[in-house]
Image (cartoon, rainbow, N blue to C red):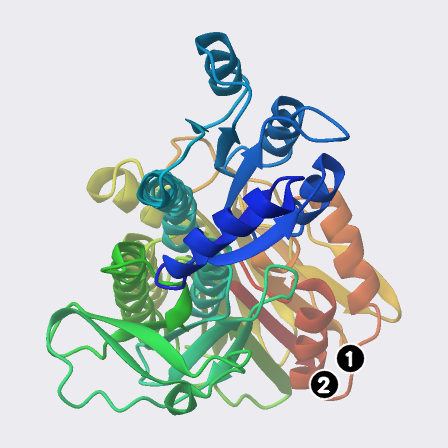
Amino acid sequence: MENEPATLLVVDDSATKRYLLVNWLTRAGFAVREAETGAAALDRAGAGDIDLVVLDVRLPDMSGYDVCERIKAADEAMPVIHVSAHAVDVADRAQGLTRGADAYLVEPIEPEELVATAQAVLRYYRARQRAELLADRLRMLADTTLAVTVASSFAQLLEVAAAGGVRIFKAPVAVIAETSDGECLAGVALGPDQPPEIRPWIVDDTGVPVGSTVRVGPARDWAVLDWDGEEEVTVAAARLRPDRAPLYVAVPASGQTPGTPVLIQLTQAIAAAVEAQRSYDEEHRIAVTLQRSLLPRQIPTIAGLDLAVRYEPASADTEIGGDFYELVMLDGHLLMAIGDVAGHSLHAATVMAELRHALRAYAVEGHQPGEMLARVDHLMRTLLPGELATVCVLLLHPPSGRVRMATAGHLPPLVLADGRVEFLDHRAALLGVLADRPADLEFELPPGATLVLYTDGLIERRDATIDEGLRALAQSARHVEDDLDRFCERLLTELAPPEIQDDVAVVALRRR
């Protein structure tokens, strides 16, 4: 440690000379170890507790020059001072310094000269060690700053920050922050070989000012983890706004350099990333709330039909999409529609709302599905140029089961009847693309049959083709539960990934 006495190794085969050197250095406040031979010196220097070697040039088993070279080869940061009563000319001193020694003293040596030389060499090496430590920590700080900036969730951010702190300080680290929902969490890491963990932990933020602060306190006050016997911890806090809770980074106090510059910079970098993540989480929650408010508030109750809907927005670390569905009775017919606006953003959700309301308006005017889509397409190309969307629209007459359908680039609906699975492939151009459109598809949904509409988030995978996704859907939907809600839930469980990266809408209808 910086304030502890340095440990010196005195290597000399003369007991009398060794006694004098040890005596002078001990009285100067150094801790001193002894060795008589070059082999013993190499063993002792490699033990890891020596700060400087005072080395005689002439030893009984090997040259002091060779010993110095081997010490430097093993640890170039180990300072060596040569002493000699025989190799005293210029050539000897030049050889010693050339082969790695940091100083060369010839006898007779004054005690003050030996002590001053040892102190000067140690000052240089300690300054060098501090500079190298700081440079190494700054390099890892840059890596950690990038890692927390690109973290995709609040929990991952805390885990990455704690893991980076362990690499920087070579000690346990706790990173404590409050989510946008007000939940206080700690990312803790005990060592580089142990995965970081997320733990709940409450901190009293009273009196923590805006800006950066550092304090040293008892480790027991920060018992979110085991501090490996440390009695005190250094805690840096960063508060970017008065209405936000501070972020804390706690590390063992014994491992900090004066002023703790790296700890402060690390805390500020994590705080900036946390603030960005909080803002994103809040914006995402607002967007999802808006998106849900634009969808139907309730499913109509219709004699002779069972209806079920599942709508799952993308995961919290993904932008919202433009998926929508519609279920409404108009003049004795059920209007069913499902669609997806291209893109993932709040803008896509607002375009989705415009399309859904336009579709409802044209349906109220009494148009058939194909004409509805033609009018919506014209509206898009006129008022929303550059936007694209897929839509599937059906008008169902519940008493007879007669269906009239039109699509615009959407995935084919699925009909399940008498153990058969059939996709209603009725291809047409996307909305927003000027192209001729086919006539409406007309068919009858038999009693007991189930019709399934869905968006691409249910079946699309980066590691699979659309055809593979459709085959998986057909296999999963072959059995239909009596409860359509359970049926839709099972489709999502079996087909959608655990972390949904795209909105998923599923609409199921069964004619009793």
- Residue 184 in which image quadrant: bottom left
Determine which quarter of the picture holds residue 303.
Answer: bottom right
Q: Could you give the CA–CA distance between mark 1 and mark 2, rounded to whole angstroms?
A: 5 Å
Of all residues shown, which one is farthest toward the right? 419
Residue appearing at x 48%, y 37% in the figure: 79
Is 260 positioned to the left or the right of 406 in the image?
A: left
Please tell me which of labels 1 and 2 falls first in the chain. 1
Label 1 neighbourhood size at 10 Å, few (<14), some (14-19), many (20+)?
A: few
Residue type at mark 1: give it: Gly
Q: Position of residue 162 (x, y in %)?
A: 47, 65
**Residue sitting farthest toward the top:** 91
Q: Nearer the viewer, residue 471 or 360?
A: 471
Crowding around mark 2 (Cα neighbors within 10 Å: few <14, some 14 to 19, many 20+) is: some
Query: What quarter of the picture does the C terminus occupy?
Result: bottom right
Q: Residue at x 40, y 55 (%)?
A: 148
Q: Residue at x 63, y 56 (%)?
A: 442
Q: Is residue 58 left or right of residue 318?
A: right
Residue where numbered disc 1 is placed: 448
Asked which secondary structure carries label 2, the reply is loop
Residue 29 placement, left or right of 503: left
Residue type highlighted by circle 2: Arg
Q: Say which quarter of the image contains residue 372.
A: bottom left
Q: How many marks?
A: 2
Q: Position of residue 107 (x, y in %)?
A: 45, 30
Residue designated by label 2? 512
The answer to whether the residues at label 1 and label 2 have Cβ atoms under 8 Å apart is: yes
